[in-house]
Amino acid sequence: GIAPNVLSKGERRMEKKSGKEVPVSAAAKTHSSKSWLYPDSAMQSRVEKIGNLLIPSFERSLSTGDPSRIHFRFEVVDMKKWNKSTPLPNGVIPVPYQEVQRMQNDSQLAALLAVDISGEIDHHAWNEQKEARTMGAATGAVMLADPALVPMVAIWGADRHEKNKLIAAEDDQNARVALWLMHRAGYDIYQAPLAFWLIASKKPEPIANIPIPLQTEDFYKELGLLWRNSPQTVAARQAAVPAA
């Protein structure tokens, strides 16, 4: 939402197939030969409400025709063998109903959507960063030195060790932005690690039976590094102290 949301040729073809107003079933056919909207209007309304609250104000303030604007749409879908939300380049975020069902509260659902929104907002940088493959080493080093950019395209040209470092940096950034979006929308940021823990297993299970996933670790790390002195954390500590 900061730079023009320019699409690659392949993404442009996908956008033409899906469009901004067609049902998500058409948009999702690039991922699955059989895809459809989940027939639960209450669940759809809940997802739309939470998703729209998470969209940052700078995105909402852009005019409809602004090339920098991302036209977010949140669609609850039922697709076999696809149980993880995957944003499409035109702003459509298909949310598998299985994910929604596993969430214990709105804050956990907000965490899932916030990560997708964060990735979609960063989308404008993907195409810019692809060009880094043709840049000189000095220019590439300048991009890499800026932790706010986390150049995705450098991942493709890097060796395995550097790829892992850049992917980890991007995951950390998504967690940071997602927590900020949740906080601004009034959701409980401490539910974010639990949300990704709950969807880490193929089938619904008690969280105690699920090995802790890396994404949950990322959220706990960001909460510990950036939010340890937040008003919520301080209030939680004070509440935990027994009365004298």
Image (cartoon, rainbow, N blue to C red):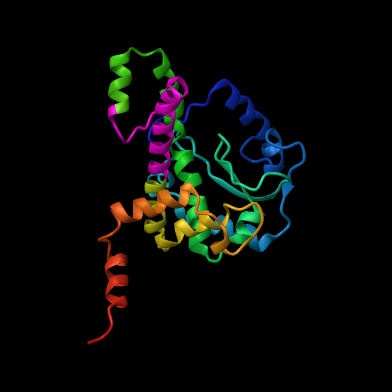
In the shown orientation, is residue 21 left or right of residue 237?
right
Q: Against 131, is 208 above or below? A: below
Q: Position of residue 207 (x, y in %)?
A: 55, 62
Q: Position of residue 157 (x, y in %)?
A: 44, 19
In the shown orientation, is residue 209 left or right of residue 159?
right
Instruction: Name the image quarter holding residue 172.
Output: top left
What residue appears at the point 66 percent right and 35 percent down from the top-left corner? 18
What residue appears at the point 58 percent right and 37 percent down from the top-left corner? 88
Q: Against 122, is 234 above or below? A: below
Q: Position of residue 108 (x, y in %)?
A: 50, 60
Q: Which residues are magenta?
A: 145-174
Instruction: Name the image quarter holding residue 228.
Output: bottom left
In the shown orientation, is residue 45 left or right of residue 143?
right
Report the quarter where the N terminus lies. Answer: top left
What residue appears at the point 44 percent right and 24 percent down from the top-left corner? 153
For this orientation, the residue located farthest to the left is 244
Provide the major secondary structure of the magenta segment: helix
For this orientation, the residue located farthest to the bottom is 244
Instruction: Name the image quarter holding residue 86.
Output: top right
